[in-house]
């Protein structure tokens, strides 16, 4: 497997994976061509050195999965860096093959390389199987997350 930064050419495949689950179907707008909002978001992510949108490819260049790592500089922990992993998706026909495990192993190593003192994630409570998966890597539910959604 090859881990690399996503390019704009990868964007339709990434959005299709993000939209291809029960929760994604309710909040994403996958269509061809993609809505401009996705292109703008990609450009913002791609131009920010603290953001890494990653695709995972098979040797034959088929994209198997995607994830986004964000590196957040803050003052606590003596000016520490916190890594955040988001939008982890594996192509539906590739699930159950150990790709997610390899993706998380890579993400943990990448966060350590960047000097992060922790890697965090949020997951919807409606995804109990995902929570069990994350716990296998040592993730613990140490805080209660809260969100304030704004109407668009």
Image: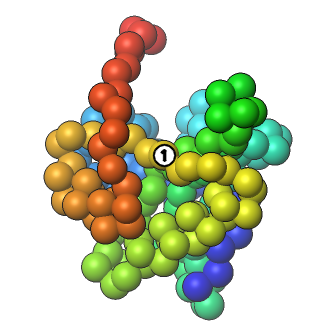
In the depicted view, which residue is nearer to us: 152 or 140? Answer: 140
Where is the C terminus found, in terms of image quarters?
top left
Q: Residue at x 48, y 77 (%)?
A: 102
Q: Residue furthest front?
A: 78
Is residue 120 found left or right of 142 in the rendered image?
Answer: right
Q: Residue at x 34, y 33 (%)?
A: 143
Q: Position of residue 22 (x, y in %)?
A: 22, 47
Q: Residue at x 37, y 82 (%)?
A: 98
Q: Residue at x 60, y 31 (%)?
A: 37
Q: Position of residue 127 (x, y in %)?
A: 21, 49
SS of the residue under disc 1: strand
In this view of the protein, can residue 10 be seen by the observer? no
In the depicted view, which residue is nearer to us: 108 or 62? Answer: 108
In this view of the protein, can residue 84 be seen by the observer? yes
Q: Residue furthest top?
A: 151
Q: Position of residue 87 (x, y in %)?
A: 47, 49
In the depicted view, which residue is nearer to us: 24 or 149? Answer: 149
Is residue 101 found left or right of 1 in the rendered image?
Answer: left
Q: Residue furthest bottom?
A: 59
In the picture of the structure, the residue carrying the numbered disc 1 is 120
In which quadrant of the rendered view does residue 144 lie?
top left
Query: Considering only vertical position in the picture, is 106 above or below 97?
Result: above
Query: Considering only vertical position in the picture, is 1 above or below 51?
Result: below
In the depicted view, which residue is nearer to us: 46 or 115? Answer: 115
Where is the N terminus found, in terms of image quarters?
bottom right
Total label count? 1
């Amino acid at each position: 497997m090859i881990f690399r930064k996503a390019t704009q050419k990868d964007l339709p495949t990434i959005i299709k994976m993000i939209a291809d689950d029960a929760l994604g179907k309710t909040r994403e707008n996958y269509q061809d061509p993609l809505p401009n909002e996705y292109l703008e978001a990609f450009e913002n992510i791609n131009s920010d050195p603290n953001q890494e949108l990653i695709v995972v490819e098979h040797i034959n260049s088929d994209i198997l999965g995607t994830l986004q790592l964000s590196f957040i500089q803050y003052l606590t922990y003596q000016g520490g860096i916190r890594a955040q992993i988001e939008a982890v998706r594996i192509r539906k026909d590739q699930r159950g093959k150990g790709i997610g495990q390899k993706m998380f192993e890579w993400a943990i190593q990448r966060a350590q390389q960047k000097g992060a003192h922790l890697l965090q994630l949020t997951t919807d409570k409606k995804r109990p199987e995902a929570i069990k998966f994350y716990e296998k890597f040592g993730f613990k539910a140490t805080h209660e997350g809260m969100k304030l959604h704004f109407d668009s």
